[in-house]
Image (cartoon, helix red, strand yellow):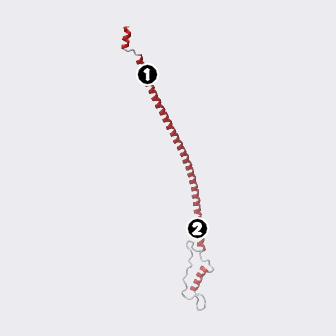
Amino acid sequence: MSDTTTPANYQTQFVVGPMTGAGGNLTVQGRQFLLALWNRTGGAPGYDISFEVTQINIALSTAQEAEVDAQKGISAAATAQGTASQALTTANQAQTTADQAEKDAQTAISDAQDVLQTSLLTSALNKARADISISNAGALAMARTIWPSQTSVFNQV
């Protein structure tokens, strides 16, 4: 089995010397060249299967971890969306309550103004009545007053 951290090296130098000897047999260089050619293109798959399996397993493991992380992200997003929906509902309820409180405050101000106007008008009316009563009392007192000149006329008779 080969090293699984790097792919196998199937590179080879082109044969510089003769491929066959004087008797027609392959030389050592010829044999090495044909073996390398065989491993790359002939009957051998041309790649290191142990290295490829290791790389596939690493990629698969990374993909599985990414899927778990994605599922956690989806779950967190759904939770956040639920929280945001609740917050929106609460905000809408608070806005409705604030609107009602504003209406109630406007009604209270209007009622207070009405009471104040009524109170001021009542006070003005009472003062006017008091002034009229004082004036009438003075006039009545003047009408009933016996003047000294009138008293002396009656006394002489």
Q: Nearer the viewer, residue 5 or 70?
A: 70
Q: Which residue is mark 2?
A: 59
Q: Position of residue 73 (x, y in %)?
A: 57, 58
Quadrant hosting residue 24? bottom right
For residue 104, above or below residue 89: above
Question: How many numbered markers are drawn?
Answer: 2
Q: Which image quarter is the C terminus in?
A: top left
For residue 132, above or below residue 42: above
Q: Of helix, strand and loop, which one carries label 1?
A: helix
Quadrant hosting residue 61? bottom right
Q: Of helix, strand and loop, which one carries label 2?
A: helix
Q: Nearer the viewer, residue 34 or 156?
A: 156
Q: Which image quarter is the N terminus in?
A: bottom right
Other-residue count near label 2 (Cα within 10 Å), few / some / many at <14 / 14–19 / ≥20: few
For residue 110, above or below residue 142: below
For residue 23, above or below residue 124: below
Drawn side of residue 113 relative to residue 145, left or right: right
Q: Which residue is mark 1?
A: 136
**Residue placed farthest to the bottom in the image?**
22
**Which residue is found at the position 58% from the left and 67% from the top?**
59
Q: Amino acid at mark 2?
A: Ala
Q: Amino acid at mark 1?
A: Asn
Q: Position of residue 147 (x, y in %)?
A: 38, 15
Q: Position of residue 20 (x, y in %)?
A: 58, 89
